[in-house]
Image (cartoon, rainbow, N blue to C red):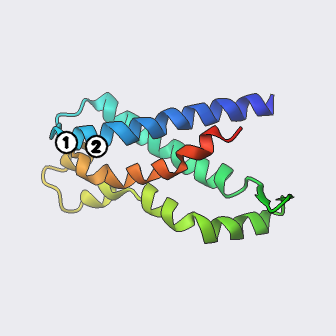
Amino acid sequence: KKVNRLKLWNALTLFLLMYNSFVVPLRWGFKYINVHPAMIAMNFALDISIYYTKIFFTATTPYENGAEWVEDPQAIFNHYKKNGLVMDVIACFPVELLALSWENPKINAVRLPNYRWNRVINVIHLPSHFND
């Protein structure tokens, strides 16, 4: 059952990753700023799922070092810290929340696609969804 839940979660995060990889550039390219509230909610749901994945899966999932699996939590976190933490923090940083301080009207901070470009960086994790 745990494997099935993990595969389901992997499929969900893959969908959300693909959503960000295509929708953010399309919205920016076509200057589409009249965003439906459901799309804003989808963006925040996407962010929450990515944060959850980074905290509970990426930073705690065993990895292969040579021919051995490393399962020590401290070693896993140290490996993540050296190899992916900075990029994930940049990719998940909520720029639109900072934009609330300078955007007028405030709704533009969540409507404008410019503040979501850093989410596209998550595409570097795409190959890991196909490693089963």
Q: Is residue 69 left or right of residue 6?
A: right
Q: Residue furthest right?
A: 68
Q: Amino acid at mark 2?
A: Pro
Question: How far apart, in angstroms, are the residues tagged by discs 2 and 1?
Answer: 6 Å
At which x and y percent is residue 106?
Answer: 19, 50
Q: Residue furthest front?
A: 66
Q: Is residue 129 left or right of residue 95?
A: right
Crowd band around label 1 with a 10 angstrom C-alpha radius: few (<14), some (14–19), many (20+)? few
Q: Quadrant of the N terminus?
A: top right
Residue drawn at x 69%, y 67% is 79
Q: Amino acid at mark 1?
A: Gly
Residue 81 in which image quadrant: bottom right
At which x and y percent is residue 59?
Answer: 67, 58
Marks 2 & 1, CB-CB < 8 Å contact: yes
Q: Which residue is mark 2?
A: 25
- Above or below: residue 131 compared with residue 55: above
Helix, strand or loop at label 1? It is helix
Residue drawn at x 31%, y 42% is 24
- Above or below: residue 125 compared with residue 88: above
Q: Quadrant of the C terminus?
A: top right
